[in-house]
Image: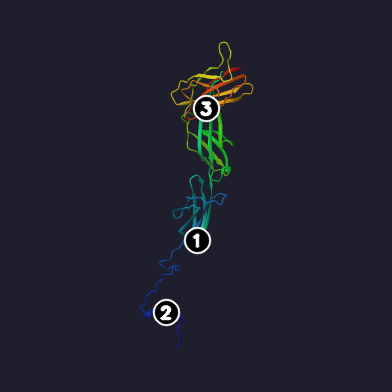
């Protein structure tokens, strides 16, 4: 008698059972309804050149039109992606996008790492207007622009910062003392030779990092240009006789108020002519005051004999100011 093979036995069994198909529930069997011809991707999103994860970055598959977000450690994962060529794009606001081209094999998981370069960004920005009244040749006008700039890759990654208005770009310098970028722009640096040209224009800070990622800040504006200022009345010089007032070592400074309608305070500044050094400053003097006795506190300071000049500035709530002409006098 011929011995039955396993295959013959199975066929005979199928005949006996009515020739029904055997169930195909193996997920690895292409004929199984549970079979899926897909692949997975997992990985991490890091800061460029740093092992620091980026949270809430968006990773997208262009072929499957699906996206996931990175977690607090920068980890992410995809499931059920189409097998074959895939383009994955990683993005986050204020970061340069990173794109990866990959090939996915069926029912495998591929690890894909993204490294994002963060563009610089502005923490705060400000422009303050200045008017310095003087006898000759005419009043001086300029603006002080400051900006605090940071970078996800660290402040050392910031390569350059500019103040931008219309098509003009002014390079800003970093101050170690204030930890800010700053620049002073005079009226003759601007079209029409006036700082009034800046009024109502959108002003921006443009920054670039060492990888050439560029960011442009939200616009900011000139708040006010103060034309009027207070006028020193004593001690000062008699413009008719050219004689300087003479005082004691604790002079009483007096002035007339400016013709303005906004809130403001005064700042008095006293300098010694021989050295041109500021020897005393009193800021935030109430706008209702029209005089102030040196040294304005209980320090007991007195002025040495010699030639001095003093000025008074009107300072608004934003920090814009208009400074008076210098008033010379003599301490005996």
Looking at the image, is mark 3 or mark 1 earlier in the sequence? 1
Sequence-wise, the earlier of marks 1 and 2 is: 2
Q: Residues within 10 Å of mark 1 (few under 14, many from 20)?
A: some
Determine whether 40 is above or below 156 in the image: below
Q: Give the secondary structure at mark 2.
A: helix
Residue at image mark 3: 283
Q: Give me the residue at 49% from left, 58% from top.
A: 41
Mark 3 to mark 2: distance in Å?
103 Å
SS at mark 3 in the image: strand
Q: Position of residue 96 (x, y in %)?
A: 52, 46
Give 21 or 140, whichever is nearer the viewer.
Answer: 140
Q: Which mark is residue 291?
A: none
Residue 45, can we see it?
yes
Q: Check the picture and name the quadrant holding the C terminus.
A: top right
Give 107 or 321, whichever is nearer the viewer. Answer: 321
Question: What residue is shown with label 2?
Answer: 10
Q: Which quadrant: the N terminus?
A: bottom left
| Residue with the mark numbered 1 | 109
| Residue 25 in the image, given as x and y percentages of width and height | 41, 70
Say above or below: 30 vs 170.
Answer: below
User: At x 51% / y 35%, what residue is drawn?
Assistant: 125
**Residue reaching furthest to the left:** 18
Residue at left 55%, top 40%? 208
């Amino acid at each position: 008698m011929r011995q039955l093979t396993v295959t013959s036995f199975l066929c005979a069994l199928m005949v006996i059972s009515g020739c029904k198909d055997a169930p195909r529930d193996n997920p690895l069997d292409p004929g199984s309804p549970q079979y899926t011809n897909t692949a997975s991707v997992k990985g991490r999103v890091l800061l460029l050149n740093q092992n620091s994860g980026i949270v809430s970055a968006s990773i997208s598959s262009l072929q499957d039109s699906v996206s996931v977000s990175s977690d607090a450690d920068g980890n992410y994962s995809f499931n059920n992606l189409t097998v074959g060529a895939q383009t994955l794009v990683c993005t986050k606001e204020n970061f340069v996008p990173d794109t990866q081209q990959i090939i996915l094999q069926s029912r495998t998981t591929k690890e894909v790492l993204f490294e994002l370069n963060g563009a610089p960004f502005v923490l705060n920005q400000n422009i303050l207007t200045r008017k310095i009244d003087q006898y000759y040749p005419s009043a001086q006008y300029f603006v002080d622009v400051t900006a605090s700039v940071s970078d996800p890759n660290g402040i050392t990654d910031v390569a350059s910062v500019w103040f931008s208005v219309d098509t003009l770009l002014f390079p800003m310098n970093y101050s170690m003392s204030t930890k800010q970028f700053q620049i002073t722009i005079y009226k003759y640096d601007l079209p029409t030779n006036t700082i009034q040209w800046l009024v109502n224009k959108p002003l921006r800070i443009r920054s670039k990092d060492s990888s050439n990622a560029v960011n442009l800040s939200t616009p900011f504006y000139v708040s006010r240009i103060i034309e009027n200022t207070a006028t020193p009345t004593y001690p000062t010089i008699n413009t008719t006789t050219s004689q300087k007032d003479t005082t004691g070592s604790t002079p009483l400074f007096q002035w007339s108020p400016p013709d303005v309608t906004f809130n403001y305070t005064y700042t008095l500044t006293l300098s010694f002519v021989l050295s041109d050094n500021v020897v005393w400053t009193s800021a935030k003097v109430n706008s209702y005051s029209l005089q102030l006795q040196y040294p304005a506190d209980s320090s007991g300071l007195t002025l040495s004999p010699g030639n001095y000049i003093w000025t008074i500035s009107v300072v608004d709530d934003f920090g814009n100011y208009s400074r008076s002409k210098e008033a010379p006098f003599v301490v005996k």
